[in-house]
Amino acid sequence: MPHLLDLPVRASLTAGHTRFVRQRGRVLRYAPGLAPFAALPDRPDAQDWEDAAVLAGPGGLLHLVGQDPELPAGWLAVSNVRSVQLVQRHPVTMYDTEVRELSPVDLPYMADLVRATRPGPFHPGSYRCTAYYGVRRHGTLIAMGGLRMRPAGHTEISTVCTLPEYRRLGLARRLVGHLSSVVADQGNTPFLHTEADQEVIPRLYGALGFEPRSHLSLREIAAPVVGGRRPGRSPGTGYIPPMPRQRGSAD
């Protein structure tokens, strides 16, 4: 039997995040405004793709994790990144007094940090399904990370990012350690996805108790559009579209 983390979006939307699901037929996705992640059936047919297009909206983006199906006519492959999925096998308590939980009041600062670092998709409403934690210095939010997908018994660490001028100071490592401690104390197992080189992973994550579990694709696809034109982004949405260069990174 496949492990639930092989398809973490589906596992999350059918377990810890059922209240955030939007479903049409056999296709699931997070509610628009929260996250662009979606889950298709194992072998999507024409009806599934039609349902996915309705859930995405004309030209809308869907992010697939662990799924790499052949796209039918009209769909556009935006990006396809190969990631390593890491799971914390040996819990390590690393609470950090400088890390604080963020709130909706911090959204403008979170959006600024995401724009400066591009850790992955970010919506202004994502705080409803993601708990964010950050580090401030001199009133500026310089680093943050989130607890996002919730498959049964697991919690994903995501959106870990640090302002360029504060990198190589170990802030991301401290954030991942803190977030892992929060997850472990909640009785769940932390996991994350990263593009880090195989030789770098032990140095970055080994001390935090993480071990590679599998390789998964992180794919961004765009739904068909009407009249052959792809709509531009609506101003003010706060959406940061590119797929992450590296998720859950530790510096």
Image (spheres, grey):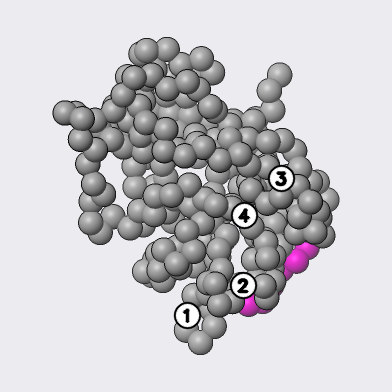
Q: Tag 2, which secondary structure?
A: loop
Residue 248, label in figure: 4
Image: magenta residue range: 92-98
Judge depth for marks 2 and 4 and give the one in front: 2
Q: Amino acid at mark 4?
A: Gly
Q: Amino acid at mark 1?
A: Thr
Judged from this view, the residue extending furthest toward the left is 227
Q: Considering depth in this image, is 5 or 163 the residue closer to the camera?
A: 163
List the residue tagged with mark 3: 86
Q: Tag 3, which secondary structure?
A: strand
Residue 141 at x, y percent in the picture: 49, 75
Judge depth for marks 2 and 3 and give the one in front: 2
Residue 34 at x, y percent in the picture: 39, 47
Of pointers 1 and 3, the one earlier in the residue sequence: 3
List the residue tagged with mark 1: 140
Residue 150 located within the stretch drawn in magenta: no
Of pointers 2 and 1, the one earlier in the residue sequence: 1
Q: Amino acid at mark 3?
A: Leu
Is mark 3 in CB contact (under 8 Å) with mark 4? Answer: yes
Q: Residue at x 42, y 45 (%)?
A: 35
Q: Is residue 1 visible?
A: yes
Measured Cα–Cα span from mark 2 to mark 4: 14 Å
Of pointers 2 and 4, the one earlier in the residue sequence: 2
Measured Cα–Cα span from mark 4 to mark 1: 21 Å
Measured Cα–Cα span from mark 1 to mark 3: 30 Å
